[in-house]
Image: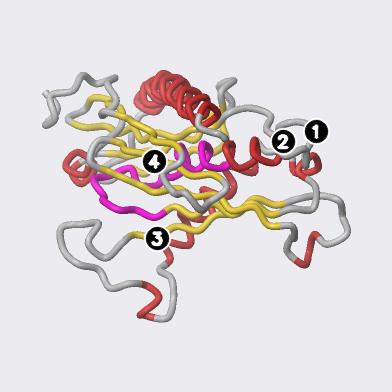
Amino acid sequence: MRPSGRAANELRAISIEPGFNRHAEGSCLIRFGDTHVLCTATVEERVPPFLRNKGTGWVTAEYGMLPRSTHSRSPREAARGKQSGRTQEIQRLIGRSLRAVVDLERLGERQVTVDCDVLQADGGTRTASITGGYVAASIALQGLVDQGLLPGLPIREAVAAVSCGIVGGEAVLDLDYVEDSGAEADANFVLSASGGIVEVQVTAEDHPILPSQLQAMQALAGEGVARLIDIQREAIAAAGTRRP
């Protein structure tokens, strides 16, 4: 029995509230159980220097955890004067995940920056950030279409992410902090709507895992991401009904 009482293939309670930030071109508050992340997307009519005059756009991301998003206060990274290696790794992952499904040539010479701010953490902050970041970016890009600035949505397909792990010898889906901290192995799967693999991160803790265990986690992740994408679609559709 999992500490939460969930079945091995059961996600935490997931909700995505679109339009959470009134100022951003796209935004949502995503909740993976007790992990809550505010995702905002900003569109700028410029690109990084290495892409100027090349007729293509860029999607990037920034990630951060609020000081009391965890049990004890963590100093703001800005106060320390530098980002941690973990922060840099996660925000690069978010950016790669979103660029994998956005047609950058159709975007034109624009940059979309997705900010993912963890308000409360209970495991899976990176997977929640990717899943919510896609919703925020989609809403922002649809706004460009609605304004006549783009002829169509420059997104090839949806992308979402979920964690899996080996706990007590069993593959389980969507680990919270209690499970993650004691898991024999943990993995993060970033998958597209068509089932394509964008990125997989797998780490064994005490001993190597078996190929069959990896396959079991991948199967669970595929089921979980399919459900997440349905929730994403509902949130994006709800955002459309709120447009003036």
Q: Label 2 vs label 4: CA separation?
A: 26 Å
Contact (Cβ within 8 Å) of mark 3 with mark 4: no
Magenta span: predominant SS is helix
Q: Is residue 232 left or right of residue 12?
A: right
In percent of width and height, residue 8 lies at: 24, 21
Q: Label 1 vs label 2: CA separation?
A: 6 Å
Q: Which residue is mark 2?
A: 145
Q: Earlier in the sequence, mark 3 or mark 2?
A: 3
Contact (Cβ within 8 Å) of mark 3 with mark 1: no
Mark 4 is surrounded, within 10 Å at the Cα level, by few (under 14), some (14 to 19) or many (20 or more) other residues, namely many
Q: Is residue 177 above or below residue 217?
A: below
Q: Which residue is mark 4?
A: 128
Which residue type carries mark 3?
A: Gly
> At numbered mark 1, what does the secondary structure look like: helix, strand or loop?
loop
Which mark's residue is nearer the viewer, 2 or 4? 2
Q: Which residue is mark 1?
A: 151
Q: Label 1 vs label 4: CA separation?
A: 30 Å
Q: Which residue is mark 3?
A: 64
* The label number, if any, that marks residue 76 in the structure image: none
Which residue type carries mark 1?
A: Pro
Q: Is residue 55 above or below residue 211?
A: below
Q: Quadrant of residue 207?
A: top left
Which mark's residue is nearer the viewer, 3 or 1? 1
Q: Viewer-proximal residue, 21 or 204?
A: 21
Q: Is residue 226 left or right of residue 213?
A: right
Q: Label 3 vs label 4: CA separation?
A: 13 Å
Within the magenta stretch, is there residue 120? yes
